[in-house]
Amino acid sequence: MVNAISGQTAVLNIRCSLASLFLHNQLFIKMFRAIALSLFITILFGMENISMGQECDCPANFQWVKETFEANDAGFALVIEKKGKAAYDELNETIEKRVKEAQNLEECLDAIQDWLLFFRKGHIGVQALDEDEAGENLSKKQIRSKFKDWQRIEQDTKKLEKSLSEREKDGLEGVWVSGDYKVGVIKQGDDHLGVILKADGVYWMPGQVKFQIRSDKAGSYYMLDHSEEKFQNAQLLDANHLVLGEFTFTRKNPKVASDPAVLRYMKAMDANMPYLEEIDPETYYLRIPSFNINYKAPIDKLITQEKEKILSKPKLIIDIRNNGGGSDDSYDELLPILYTQPIEVVGAELLSTPLNNKGIADVIKNPKLDEETREFLEETFEKLSNNIGEFVNLEDEKVQYIEYDEIHPSPSKIAILINENNASAAEEFLLAARQSKKVQLFGNNTAGILDVSNVNIIKSPCKKFVLAYSLSKSYRIPEKAIDNVGVTPDHKIPPSVPGHEWVDFAMKKLVDK
């Protein structure tokens, strides 16, 4: 769930940080934590593209994606083996027809994305580059012109805002804000429309329709570039808080009293940094919205500063709902608090191809690398280069164990709140955490996007979009696979329990494990 302004740029269908490679294998994470970001930048912006001639039409783009993915993605062969070549041939026939009929880049990428989803739902995707990234710098006037025919409500927005502000009834109609957006929600037939009252004045102008909520609570939200994000259930948590999928709006007018539990929930879901707060004399609440590599320092600092407090109470609630992952490194300081016995960590193997290995070769050239890291990367590159076309384990063992010298007596009961938006490194954290005798998981099954991971991103030959695919696969496959299954909670929270009541639900159910 995000504030609307922070979620404007379209994202790849990837549920983890794209800024780190190799971060889902604890066996060699220590070496890569210092170079992850530079490796990502090298791959995204410095890598030479595979030659595809001068053709940049949709069929040619699809052929490039298909050939690149087949040769380099770590999960490709797994799916073909499972679903069969006949199903793959049928898919190709369907998509080839669609790409021939595509009228623009959006339709082309929609077809290619559907092709990719045949393989898995995460750590994969295509994403159109914006005008600046594609080398097309549009002026503000050109951007306004591009969206001038967008659906709009033909009435004076100042009068509309005044009218909505004077409403005395509850419900959706009113003036709502999210980030820099001010929106008037009006009823039109059985639907509700969110009409821009104030925005950036470039991509979005007063009067344009920002979102639509149908009578069945499903609807559409439109991003900065006006691309559509569908949601299934618009939720009015209380009179002042509206949730549309991953986007949240707060009522500005008419003024209505808020539910304290909802305010606490909204604070948690909108948080962009981790924080700790006391719930009652026996319980602390720790909110961690992301394990992105940029969150490592704030998480480490918070736990270091507040560790004495955390260890002083018998209960701890850790809320990682909507945490889409990032880097395993980010939860290093959490594990000692949870620890009761050696933690099993299953490793991964990398697919060695010239394209996949080139990223490492490029990083080796970085003059800022320390000598130890350079030597490790050179050994890694040599090992991968000597095994082209094969999966390579960079360590001697498939499984290793994390051990700590101390088991803290308190907190003795730890609840972790999880949901369907937890993926990637967040799921890796849960696999480690649930091995503790202190920990119980509450919520819903997670996304199941972990086993085939460590994303590589390359620009298309036409430089109009990027392709993301995965470099590694876990040794959990197939017996203990998480992909398409997810991590199952110890206590499922029924759909009838709204998000702002999950903390209370967990506190009542938290018992000795």
Image (cartoon, rainbow, N blue to C red):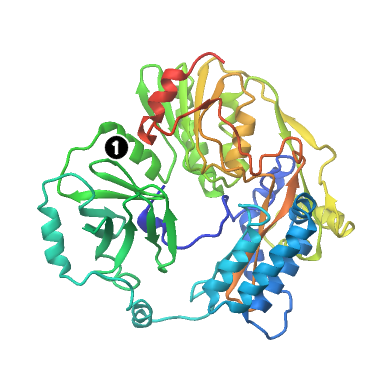
The answer to whether residue 356 is seen in the rendering is no
Q: Is residue 293 left or right of residue 182?
A: right
Q: Amino acid at mark 1?
A: Leu
Q: Residue at x 51, y 22 (%)?
A: 414
Is 280 or 78 nearer to us in this picture?
Answer: 78
In this view, the residue farthest toward the bottom is 54
Dividing the picture into quadrants, the one containing residue 37 is: bottom right
- Residue 274 shown left or right of residue 238 in the figure: right
The residue sitting at 46% across, 31% down in the picture is 305
- Residue 352 vs residue 172: left or right? right
Q: With respect to residue 171, does 47 lie above or below?
A: below
Indicate the quadrant where residue 343 lies: top right
Q: What residue sits 78% from the left and 63% below the top? A: 71
Residue 97 rendering spot, x and y as whole percentages: 65, 74
Residue 316 x/y as whole percent: 46, 23
Could you tell me how many numbered marks the image carries?
Answer: 1
- 192 or 2, which lies in front? 192
Looking at the image, residue 451 lies above or below residue 382: above
Q: Is residue 365 above or below residue 18?
A: below
Residue 396 in percent (x, y) is at 85, 39
Q: Residues within 10 Å of mark 1 (few under 14, many from 20)?
A: some
Q: Is residue 173 visible?
A: yes
Dot 1 lies on which element?
Answer: helix
Which residue, given by chain and number where applicable, does mark 1 sit on?
263
Looking at the picture, how far across and down is residue 176, in whole percent? 24, 53
Residue nearest the viewer, comparing 101 with 497: 101
Pick out the residue farthest to the right: 386
At horizontal 38% and vertical 59% (from top left) the residue drawn is 221
Occupied quadrant, residue 101: bottom right
- Quadrant in which the C terminus appears: top right
